[in-house]
């Protein structure tokens, strides 16, 4: 993560999301921030390159989607990654939302069943079994979670981010990037995909 953030061309005042199977959402600071509110919201201070501090929170990423895709494939359903995202984004409405950081979604026997159970708890009468509808549920829920964590970081630091830089493999997910921009009300810039490699090389070059 340290290499990824070092390799991200962060503009002053911008937040970041290191997006992948799991995600890290935060801001780069010049000093640590430690108090009871930070502890209550489970944010951490990690040492960064060149004396910086990564003030961030670990949150769920595309693990939910990847797990569902494996189950769909096992059932013989067509689940091409790009097709699912493009067609799901075109849906006019979502069947509902889930809380991506629910511990029950970390490694359930069946991710589809776990998502369906949470949808039911959240008021959805019948959880959809259509991959497109579930893809929309997952992406919209992740975007809202990212936005929520960004707002918490803003409240803890008393600094509103000017925008969000999304790096890592998940930055190729245009649907999630756009949904995050909408949910956070902030401009989002995606890439580089290989920020970890870039940052590692840059730090070695400086050394």
Image (tube, rainbow, N blue to C red):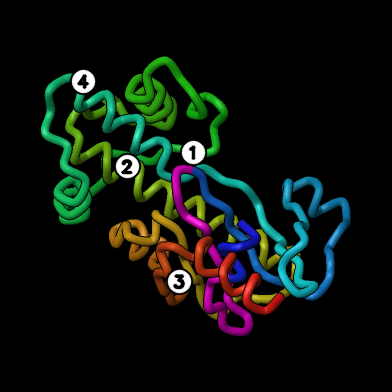
Question: Nearer the observer, disc 3 or disc 4?
Answer: 4
Q: Which residue is mark 2?
A: 137
Name the element at disc 4: helix
Q: Secondary structure at mark 1?
A: loop
Residue at the limit of the structure toward the right, as seen here: 35
Up-down: is 122 above or below 200? Answer: above
Up the image or down, 25 lies above or below 14; here it is: above
Coordinates of residue 35 in the picture (x, y in percent): 88, 56
- Image point (83%, 71%), residue name: 31
Distance between mark 2 and mark 4 Cα atoms = 21 Å
Which residue in the protein does label 1 denote?
99
Sooner in the amino-acid sequence: mark 2 or mark 1: 1
Q: Quick one: label 4 or label 1, which is nearer the N terminus? A: 4
Question: Magenta: predominant secondary structure element?
Answer: loop
Provide the residue designation for mark 3.
185
- Pick whichever, 23 or 179, lies toward us: 23
For the residues labelled 2 and 4, say whether their Cβ atoms are less than 8 Å apart: no
- Residue 17 visible in the displayed image: yes
**Number of residues whose C-alpha sits closer than 10 Å to that of mark 4, classed few (under 14), some (14–19) or many (20 or more):** few
Front position among marks 2 and 4: 4
Q: Secondary structure at mark 2?
A: helix
Crowding at label 2, few (<14), some or many (≥20) Cα neighbours within 10 Å? many
Pointer 3 local density, CA inside 10 Å: few below 14, some 14–19, many at least 20? few
Q: Mark 3 to mark 4: distance in Å?
A: 38 Å
CA separation, marks 1 and 3? 20 Å
Q: Is residue 15 magenta?
A: yes
Q: Work out whether residue 92 can be spotted.
A: no
Quote the CA–CA distance across marks 2 and 3: 19 Å
What residue is pinned by disc 4?
A: 74
């Amino acid at each position: 993560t340290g290499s990824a953030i070092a390799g991200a061309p962060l503009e002053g005042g911008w937040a970041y999301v290191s997006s992948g199977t799991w995600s890290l959402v935060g801001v780069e600071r010049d000093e640590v921030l430690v108090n009871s509110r930070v502890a209550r919201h489970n944010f951490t201070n990690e040492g960064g390159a060149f004396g910086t501090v990564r003030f961030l929170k670990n949150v769920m990423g595309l693990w939910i989607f990847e797990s569902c895709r494996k189950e769909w494939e096992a059932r013989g359903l067509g689940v091409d990654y790009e097709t699912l995202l493009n067609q799901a984004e075109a849906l006019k409405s979502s069947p509902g939302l889930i809380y991506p950081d629910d511990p029950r979604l970390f490694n359930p026997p069946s991710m589809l069943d776990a998502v369906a159970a949470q949808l039911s708890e959240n008021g959805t009468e019948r959880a959809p079994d259509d991959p497109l509808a579930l893809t929309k549920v997952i992406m919209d829920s992740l975007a809202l979670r990212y936005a929520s964590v960004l707002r918490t970081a803003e409240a803890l630091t008393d600094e509103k981010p000017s925008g969000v830089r999304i790096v890592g493999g998940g930055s190729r997910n245009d649907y999630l990037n756009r949904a995050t921009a909408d949910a956070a009300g902030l401009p989002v810039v995606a890439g580089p995909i290989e920020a970890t490699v870039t940052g590692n090389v840059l730090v070695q070059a400086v050394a």
